[in-house]
Amino acid sequence: MSISTGLEFAAENVLPIIRSLIAKRLLESGYSQLRVAKILGVTQPAVNRYVSRDYDELLSKAESLGINRDWVLEVVKNVVELVLSSREYEALEYLTNAVIMELGSLRLCDAHRRLVPSLPTNCNVCSVLITGISDSIIKNVERALSILEAHPEIQVVIPRVLMNIVEAKPGAVTEDDVVGVPGRIDAHDGRVIVGSRPTYGGSKHLGRLIIKCMNVNPRYRSVASIKYDEKVENALRGLGIHYVKVGPHESPNEDEVISAVANSLIKDPTLEVVIDLGGYALEPVTYVFGLDAMDVALKIVRIASRIT
């Protein structure tokens, strides 16, 4: 038996791949090696080593270990976007939270065991990382809301029934395990207005929806509801976001909508967005899914920015 910890595995195998990809993206965005070194907290020679490996080599290394390629790319994309927006502290918080959640959800166990076969087959030690996660989920939703508040352009995607965003605990069972905004999200006089502080059980509808969808794709712990129109669909298409439409429904109700959206993910778990076309007295809505609330908020900003 080995006492090699998941934290060591992440530090020695997961983070170097993510750091290398972040460094390459920042250099492509015009940053110098010296500036990238300062952001990553490493030396310039270390940055030079990071970028000496090409994308395919880095992603193949991740896949050879059993680390999910799409998860790595999504984390890198979001960290880079935050850094480019001069939100280095939020990037640090996001990266730390993303890696801890992946460890705590036990999705890196197989990868760790490939390198350390002497790990016990029933090891679930890393689950301790998310046993006290309640405050962390609320803080992550608050960070996502701060991103939305800083981008007034998202008012173009707020539906008539207003917008909401939720994030669920890993293993959430009821909507009371899901953080949302009770007063929803609105816009007025060019400002994004968050109705109230996020809390558990803050959105019954999105809470029920994300729990049902987590049964299909456990990586999706967050979803937001934005408006649907031709401009939104064109933005999704232009950004290369994978989406599908469901409905319209003959006799729409909440259960029917939730089942239709979840069934779409059953058919294709790689979907990032499901558009529900609504029905009589039910407004069409675009549901944006992501790893967590920050991931979803950044997708919404990209969609809104594409429109404006």
Image (tube, rainbow, N blue to C red):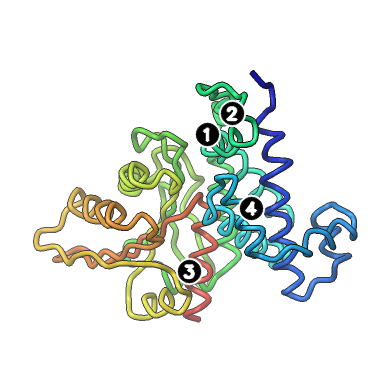
Q: Are marks 1 and 2 in contact (CB under 8 Å)?
A: yes
> Relative to 53, is 160 on the left or the right?
left
Q: Is residue 283 above or below residue 5?
A: below
- Residue at (14, 66) in percent of width and height: 280
Q: Secondary structure at mark 3?
A: strand
Q: Which residue is mark 1?
A: 106
CA–CA distance between discs 4 and 2?
A: 23 Å
For the N terminus, the quadrant is top right
Q: For this view, does 49 lie left or right of residue 162?
A: right
Q: CA distance from mark 1 to mark 2?
A: 7 Å
Please provide percent x and percent y for residue 233.
Answer: 36, 76
Nearest the eye: 266 or 198: 266
In the picture as drawn, the residue positioned furthest to the left comes out as 250
For label 3, the residue is 188
The residue that mark 2 highlights is 126
Nearer to me, 41 or 146: 41
Which residue matches tag 4?
A: 61
Q: Nearer the viewer, mark 4 or mark 1?
A: 4
Tell which of 225 and 34 is nearer to you: 34
Q: Nearer the viewer, mark 2 or mark 3?
A: 2
Q: Secondary structure at mark 2?
A: helix
